[in-house]
Image (cartoon, grey):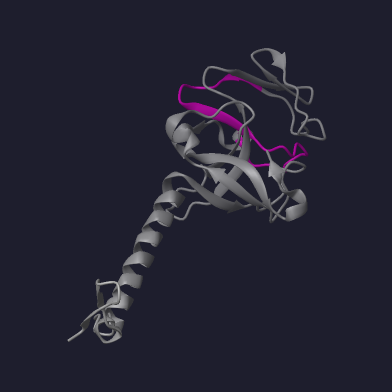
Amino acid sequence: MGIYESQDGREAVTAAATEQIPTRSVAEELWDWTKSIAVALVIVILLNMFVFNLSTVKGHSMEPTLREKEWLFVNKLTFLIGHPDRGDVVILKDPDMQSVDRQYLVKRVVATPGDKVEIRGGKLYVNGEAVSEPYTDIKIEDGDRGPIVVEEGRYFVMGDNRHQLASKDSRTFGTVPEKAIQGRAEFILWPLRQMGGL
């Protein structure tokens, strides 16, 4: 029957009745897991495309700030709602490579649209004033440049390594369009001893 009267007068379900609850098939369980994994993958892909990604430093053009094989946390959202500023360390598409598999560079924004840039006597000048650059450890060795005025919607970028021919940057390929800048590097995530903000 499945129902009995308890001593206090209330009805209760017998143990036999509880055993008749239907169980889910293996196929239904697998389908649920598949849907959950698919949703998680879509979320990760969207976050990677529009919010953040991880990038590995290759080469020596940003020494002493960044060293080869360090992992960077790159904030992509910040430039969807704002613009690069002087001093930002950014990830950008290499302007010299036009293929779909373009490589990415990590550089520092040293001048923004409308700024006048000049390199004179081993120092960087923006709008006629010498720029304090505590992130470098040497004067600029590649000779004098400019002055040039950065065009609207474009940026002048340089590597922190100012030794001769140590960095491929705006001194080589000119100013870069804002659309080439993919995000701002904000943290060193690895190795642990180097972990910290930029």
Q: Is residue 140 above or below residue 28?
A: above
User: Which residue is rendered at x = 49% and y = 51% of the image?
Assistant: 102
Toward which corner of the image does residue 37 lie, by quadrant? bottom left
Taking the view exactly as shown, the residue that stands out farthest to the top is: 128
Taking the view exactly as shown, the residue that stands out farthest to the left is: 1
Magenta range is 146-169
Where is residue 46 shown, x and y percent of the image? 39, 51
> Residue 61, can we see it?
no
Toward which corner of the image does residue 42 lie, by quadrant? bottom left
User: Which residue is rendered at x = 21% and y = 84% of the image?
Assistant: 2
Q: Nearer the viewer, residue 53 or 66?
A: 53
Q: Is residue 118 left or right of residue 77?
A: right
Q: Is residue 57 above or below residue 143?
A: below
Where is residue 26 shown, x and y percent of the image? 31, 83
Instruction: Report if residue 149 lies within the magenta region.
Output: yes
Q: Nearer the viewer, residue 172 or 25?
A: 25
Where is residue 31 shown, x and y percent of the image? 29, 74
Instruction: Report if residue 153 lies within the magenta region.
Output: yes
Q: Quadrant of the N terminus?
A: bottom left
Q: Is residue 16 left or right of residue 78?
A: left
